[in-house]
Amino acid sequence: MTNLDIWTYAVVGSTFLLYIIIAVWARAGTTGEFYVAGKGIHPVANGMATAADWMSAASFISMAGMIAFQGYGASVFLMGWTGGYVLLALLLAPYLRKFGKFTVPEFIGDRYYSQTARIVAVICLILASITYVIGQMKGIGVAFSRFLEIPYDTGLYIGMAIVAVYAVLGGMKGITYTQIAQYVVLIMAYTIPAIFISLNLTGNPIPQLGLGSGYAPADGTISLLGRLDQVVTELGFKEYTTQVMGSTLNMFAYTLSLMIGTAGLPHVIIRFFTVPKVADARYSAGWALVFIAILYTTAPAVGAMARLNFTDTLMTQQPGSTEEGLAGFQPADYEALPEWFKNWQDTGLLAWQDLNDDGKVQYYDDTNPAAQAQAEELGWEGSEIFHQAGGTLKPGPDLDIMVLANPEIAGLPNWVIALIVAGGLAAALSTAAGLLLAISSAISHDLLKGVFMPSISEKAELNAGRVAMIFAILLAGWLGLHPPGFAAGTVAIAFGLAASSIFPALMMGIFMKKMNNTGAIAGMIAGITVTLLYVFQHFGIFFVRGTEFLMPEWGMGKDWFFGISPNAFGAVGALVNFIVAFIVAAVTAPPPDHIQHLVEDVRVPRGAGEATGH
């Protein structure tokens, strides 16, 4: 067993032990504690738990990888995911807390005075949550398989067991306190390596400032971003700081889809039901933004520095380099490649094949005609770095490895590498637990208690919630073991599903007292159906073309609707939802008077108008 193995087992094992101890201490004894932690969580604590619940494997593992290889274009994730919290804090959280229900489908069912509306909301919730949880399971399996040197399947089983202990036993109460511990673990794991790497590359210990600082190996004569632009363009890639994701319309739609998807994700919304007062819901959202910002402002620096280190360790700068593009670099000798590269080859997420038997590793953008032409002049036969996914060879590394591999690439100590493994697992486990609770509560509380067995006792409902949680964990594990072909894009798709179905229903339920149940039901069905059809229609195209579903080659989207990618289509689905709901509501009977008064009471603060007598 190597020194790294010892550190990894020690750090990961101690964090898992902490989670189990917290779960035993905070086990739920009532349905109120199981669903909403007894509505007694302090706003600051809830903000920290919300941040952990929100920052999934996609935020911790994938986002910096996307920023590393997509540059400025990947800013849609930063803007969309953080902007969504502003919408949530201003437009949804306080009103939903004032309504006082346990779950999102329960609010929709009561607001639209319809069990059908509640069932449709449950279906939409399960579709979005299950889609989202696949990515968390993949993150758990990848982290275990690389750093604990155990099979992917075994790592996934361990992750499922840990989630089962603290989620089934503690419910929302146990999950909340566990997520607070997980936030501390993941934020330390993310920022400590970033500080070390920023010091090495810029001399500045603050990564956010280091991103705009001078590049230390060049004595600060060029900025870090300027150096990165120079490196990637000389290799035939697009300039890092100006690279975009398709058209301006697609960037806008992608950002909007992520924003309203954030505000519509049930496992996030349910967190605001756990605080004592309505005002606490706003404070929780504000604190969550503060805690999230620590990671989200660090991510651009992590991504940029990872890309620079990745390229520098694979290519050798030639003396007297000019602006002749690829001629400015020479391929690294395979025997001289760093140990981290060879370690990651075992996972299948990073591979190398000598296409022209020259013993050197060629790395360039083989989708760029100019880079490809220059590579042919140099006798290169194709970019030789790739990863394999879905049976299709894809140029370049898997984006999910960048954060986990970053400390190895930078040559940081083993304890730092072990810490980032624990952080990645904490991020995946915390979000998986929140999603699984949302699924189980929808089944036990909304379907069983709310529709099929309204007279069920509290103890029976609590047991049913735990059984539903176990089945949800088993289903999530099975999907993690057998992910669909678009597993790499499931997170963005999940946001699209929530954006096109749940968010419009919540907005109209709070701010439109004339919106009736027929309109809301028709809108939810239309929105999620259009989004699903668009996604599945283009799934085959992406698979055949061998591009990443989450981050496809944007030039290949000629058959997209107005150039909008499937991952950004949730915004269009939401628009369809609103339009259909308005039309149907206009030609059907308005809601009963008591529902309209209920909406006004939820939206208007208590005591409004008393000072003026109105």
Image (cartoon, rainbow, N blue to C red):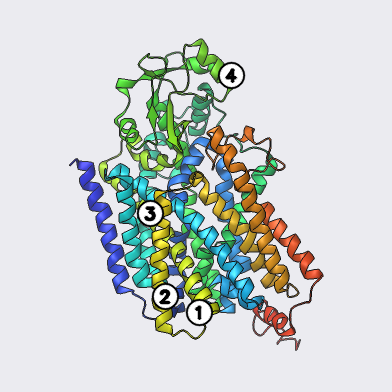
SS at mark 4? helix
Query: Where is residue 361 shown, x and y percent of the image?
Result: 39, 21
Q: CA distance from mark 4 to mark 3?
A: 41 Å
What residue did someone put label 1 on?
449
- Say which amino acid is labelled 3: Leu
Q: CA distance from mark 3 to mark 2?
A: 32 Å
Q: Nearer the viewer, mark 3 or mark 2?
A: 2
1 or 3: tag closer to the N-terminus: 3
Separation of marks 1 and 3 at Cα, in angstroms: 36 Å
Q: Is residue 65 above or below residue 339?
A: below
The x, y position of residue 251, in whole percent, is: 64, 44
Q: CA distance from mark 2 to mark 1?
A: 10 Å
Please give the label number shown on residue 464: 2
Residue 186's disc is 3
Which mark's residue is nearer the viewer, 1 or 3? 1
Which residue is located at x 59 percent, y 56 percent?
Answer: 497
Tell me which label, 4 or 3, sits earlier in the chain.
3
Circle number at residue 195: none
The N terminus lies in quadrant: top left
The extreme right residue here reads 587
- Dot 2 amino acid type: Ala
Q: Is 586 placed left or right of 28 in the picture?
A: right
Marks 4 and 3: CB-CB under 8 Å?
no
